[in-house]
Image: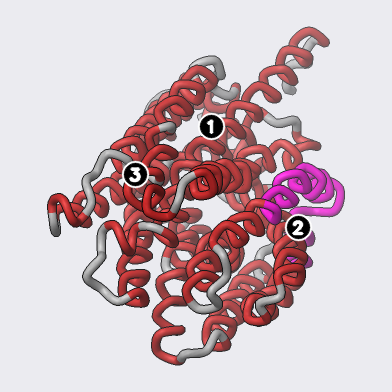
């Protein structure tokens, strides 16, 4: 029988859970600030700074190609960081991932443009983007797993929303940084050097994130696991041999949310400016406004998931998301600013509905001893197939077909695939995943 916790121990455990959730939110915000800063610059600046000899459409495809390169390295980061997180601790691995991402972002702000060093400029940009992707590949899994393992059993949806809130918070921070310098400088100054300042400021955010992550503790469940006799295979071998079906399921669940999110967060900036000739400042403002609703509504959706069931919430949210995606680019095509702003606000709420629950839902599918590795590989694979290639695919489809309908049909197909994967999940896959992992650990300790 489990030892009863004293009131003092329960209070201390609750305080630690809140501290971990807060640290996960802040750390995730910083990591996603770095990531979305790059994405925003890829949409607005990099085609002219690093690919100036290409026509605008080809330059955008090349810039989004460097964005996709970071996604290609994220599964590798999930694999490597997941191994160390499962073997040597979640906390230390999260610190390393934060350092890698933050330092790469700062370095991107120092790269000379194509005019100064020629082809070496896009090569350095791509290299730093790949390394940054490796760092971010270990961020999501660690933040979600740490929060999940500290959270009270009846509030895992609410606490699990905390690291997910870092996505819109990082998006808001990155876009406000770009927006501020874009509005305060003329186009020539912003293109020449103003875009670099938000990248260089990342080093200050890095210091804040390190301070917070050094103050959190490992979960009781992982500490117990670490004290158990060492056995068996590497975590990645266990994941790929015994849990590959769960990796595929989780990746397909994630892919639909990720694809629509990156059209909302990234591709709309390029499409709206180059195709519909909308002001980039207005487009950034609509993205920030939608992300603000995404951010503030996430805790409510997480709490609803605790009461209603994570799978049910995600299914309903997925149906709404697919329906909303059908109108996304047609609304932008109208050029009506009030309508576009209203739609972006509503899209923020729709994305929050599924994004808030996806972390705890998918990470709980994996046992404790491989949870960091399994959830990281699944999430980064789903993000690559969804968000990583979607801006690139969208730009290529538009270039080939000259109509946004092709992009809309692509989003619809990916959304249906994700819905089918979610519908195929059972309570065994999701709802009792954490309980099964803890029971598995207890069995191992008894053996």
Residue 50 seen anywhere in this rendered image of the structure: yes
Question: Main SS type for the magenta part?
Answer: helix
- Pinpoint residue 97: horizontal percent, then vertical percent: 39, 34
Q: Is residue 388 left or right of residue 179?
A: left
**Disc nearer the start of the sequence (3/1):** 1
User: Is label 2 in a helix, a strand or a loop?
Assistant: helix
Q: Going by the picture, which residue comes out furthest to the bottom?
A: 401
- Pinpoint residue 396: horizontal percent, then vertical percent: 39, 80
Quadrant hosting residue 353: bottom right
Is residue 431 depicted above or below 411 in this figure?
Answer: above
The crowd level at tag 1 (other Cα within 10 Å; few <14, some 14-19, many 20+) is: many
Taking depth in this image into account, of 298 and 381 the one nearest to the observer is: 298
**Disc nearer the start of the sequence (1/2):** 1
* Residue that badge 2 annotates: 349
- Pinpoint residue 372: horizontal percent, then vertical percent: 48, 40
| Cα–Cα gap, marks 1 and 2 | 23 Å
Q: Are marks 3 and 1 in contact (CB under 8 Å)?
A: no
| Cα–Cα gap, marks 3 and 1 | 27 Å
Reply yes or no: does residue 138 show up in magenta: no
Give the residue displayed 58% in from the left and 24% down from the top.
219
* Residue that badge 3 annotates: 193
Residue 318 seen anywhere in this rendered image of the structure: no
User: Is label 3 in a helix, a strand or a loop?
Assistant: helix
| Cα–Cα gap, marks 2 and 3 | 35 Å
Taking depth in this image into account, of 271 and 162 the one nearest to the observer is: 271
Bounds of the magenta span? 289-318
Q: Going by the picture, which residue comes out furthest to the right?
A: 307
């Amino acid at each position: 029988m489990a030892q009863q916790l004293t009131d003092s121990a329960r209070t201390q455990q609750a305080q630690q859970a809140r501290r971990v959730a807060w640290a996960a939110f802040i750390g995730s915000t910083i990591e996603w600030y770095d990531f979305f800063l790059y994405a925003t610059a890829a949409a607005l600046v990099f085609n002219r700074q690093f690919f100036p000899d290409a026509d605008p459409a080809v330059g955008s495809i090349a810039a989004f190609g460097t964005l996709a390169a970071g996604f290609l390295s994220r599964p590798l980061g999930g694999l490597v960081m997941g191994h160390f997180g499962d073997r040597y601790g979640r906390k230390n691995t999260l610190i390393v991932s934060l350092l890698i991402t933050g330092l790469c972002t700062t370095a991107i702000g120092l790269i000379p443009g194509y005019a100064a060093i020629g082809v070496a400029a896009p090569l350095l940009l791509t290299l730093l983007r790949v390394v940054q992707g490796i760092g971010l590949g270990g961020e999501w899994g660690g933040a979600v797993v740490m929060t999940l393992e500290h959270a009270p059993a009846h509030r895992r949806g609410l606490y699990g929303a905390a690291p997910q809130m870092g996505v819109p918070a990082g998006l808001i921070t990155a876009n406000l940084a770009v927006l501020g310098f874009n509005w305060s400088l003329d186009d020539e100054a912003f293109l020449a050097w103003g875009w670099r300042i938000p990248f260089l400021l990342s080093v200050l955010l890095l210091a804040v994130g390190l301070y917070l992550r050094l103050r959190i503790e490992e979960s009781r469940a992982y500490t117990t696991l670490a004290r158990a006799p060492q056995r068996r295979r590497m975590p990645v071998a266990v994941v790929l041999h015994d849990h590959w079906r769960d990796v595929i399921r989780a990746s397909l669940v994630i892919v639909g949310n990720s694809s629509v999110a990156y059209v909302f967060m990234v591709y709309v900036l390029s499409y709206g400016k180059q195709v519909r000739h909308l002001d980039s400042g207005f487009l950034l403002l609509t993205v920030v406004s939608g992300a603000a609703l995404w951010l503030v509504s996430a805790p409510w959706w997480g709490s609803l998931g605790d009461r209603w069931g994570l799978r049910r919430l995600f299914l309903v949210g997925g149906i709404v998301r697919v329906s909303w995606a059908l109108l996304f680019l047609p609304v932008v095509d109208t050029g009506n600013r009030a309508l576009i702003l209203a739609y972006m606000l509503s899209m923020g709420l729709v994305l929050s509905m599924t994004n808030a629950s996806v972390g705890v839902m998918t990470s709980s599918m994996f046992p404790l001893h491989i949870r960091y590795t399994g959830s990281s590989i699944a999430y980064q694979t789903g993000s690559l197939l969804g968000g990583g290639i979607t801006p690139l695919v969208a730009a290529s489809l538009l270039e080939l077909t000259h109509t946004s309908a092709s992009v809309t049909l692509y989003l619809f197909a990916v959304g249906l695939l994700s819905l089918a994967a979610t519908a195929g999940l059972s309570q065994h896959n999701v709802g009792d995943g954490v309980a099964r992992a803890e029971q598995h650990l207890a069995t191992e300790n008894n053996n």
